[in-house]
């Protein structure tokens, strides 16, 4: 099930209250994204960070149409519900028989795709 974002409200620091189409809501702390790098470095600029909006067509929290976070991720962070199975990284055995995190190709959400490298970075922020 896709949990579209319908409302978002800045709380403080890097925290935003997010409300979903099913009426559930919660506060998401985006400070963990600060260490990811790449496009998320823009979150260090509080003027940029607080300029978010909700894209009603896609049901995502977005920053100027440049950055958005999958609503399934936000739903999990806000409500404590687990991520959908299709978003969880597959565990792969390495040469020693141990386990390492891995992904198969790309993660697809609706019609958009993330390159493998961005997906791996994104998954690390969830763990």
Image (tube, grey):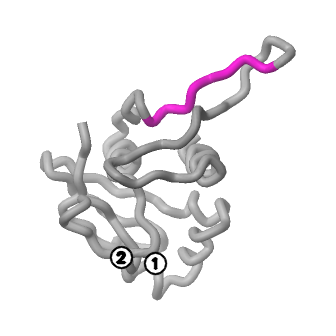
Decide which of 64, 26 is in the foreground and name it: 64
The residue labelled by disc 2 is: 52
* Above or below 97: residue 89: below
Q: Position of residue 26 (x, y in %)?
A: 29, 53
Queried whether the magenta region covers residue 125, the answer comes back as no
Give the farthest residue toward the top. 97
* Above or below 21: residue 81: above
Q: Quadrant of the C terminus?
A: top right
Which disc is residue 89 wearing?
none
Which disc is residue 49 wearing?
1
* Above or below 43: residue 6: above
The magenta span reads 87-94
**Label 1 to label 2, Cα distance in Å?**
6 Å
Give the farthest residue toward the right. 96
In the displayed structure, does residue 122 sit left or right of residue 58?
right
User: Pointer 2: residues within 10 angstroms few (<14), some, or many (20+)?
Assistant: some
Q: What residue do we see at 29% from left, 75% from top?
A: 53
In the displayed structure, does residue 123 sit left or right of residue 73?
right
- The quarter holding residue 81 reads top left
- The quarter holding residue 7 reads bottom left
Q: What residue do we see at 19% from left, 47% from top?
A: 24
In the displayed structure, does residue 4 sit left or right of residue 10?
left
Helix, strand or loop at mark 1: helix
User: Pointer 1: residues within 10 angstroms few (<14), some, or many (20+)?
Assistant: many
Helix, strand or loop at mark 2: loop
Decide which of 80, 55 is in the foreground and name it: 55
Q: What residue do we see at 38% from left, 82% from top?
A: 51
Asked if marks 1 and 2 touch (Cβ < 8 Å), the reply is yes
């Amino acid at each position: 099930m896709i949990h579209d974002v319908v409302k978002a409200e800045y709380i403080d620091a890097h925290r935003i209250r997010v409300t979903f189409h099913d009426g559930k809501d919660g506060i998401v702390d985006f400070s963990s994204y600060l260490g990811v790098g790449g496009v998320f470095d823009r979150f260090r600029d509080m003027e940029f960070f607080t300029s978010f909006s909700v894209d009603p067509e896609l049901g995502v929290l977005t920053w100027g149409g440049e950055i958005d976070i999958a609503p399934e991720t936000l739903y999990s962070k806000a409500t404590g519900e687990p991520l959908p199975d299709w978003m969880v990284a597959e565990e792969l055995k390495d040469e020693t028989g141990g386990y390492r995190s891995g992904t198969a190709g790309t993660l697809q959400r609706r019609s958009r795709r993330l390159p493998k490298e961005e997906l791996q970075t994104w998954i690390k922020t969830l763990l």
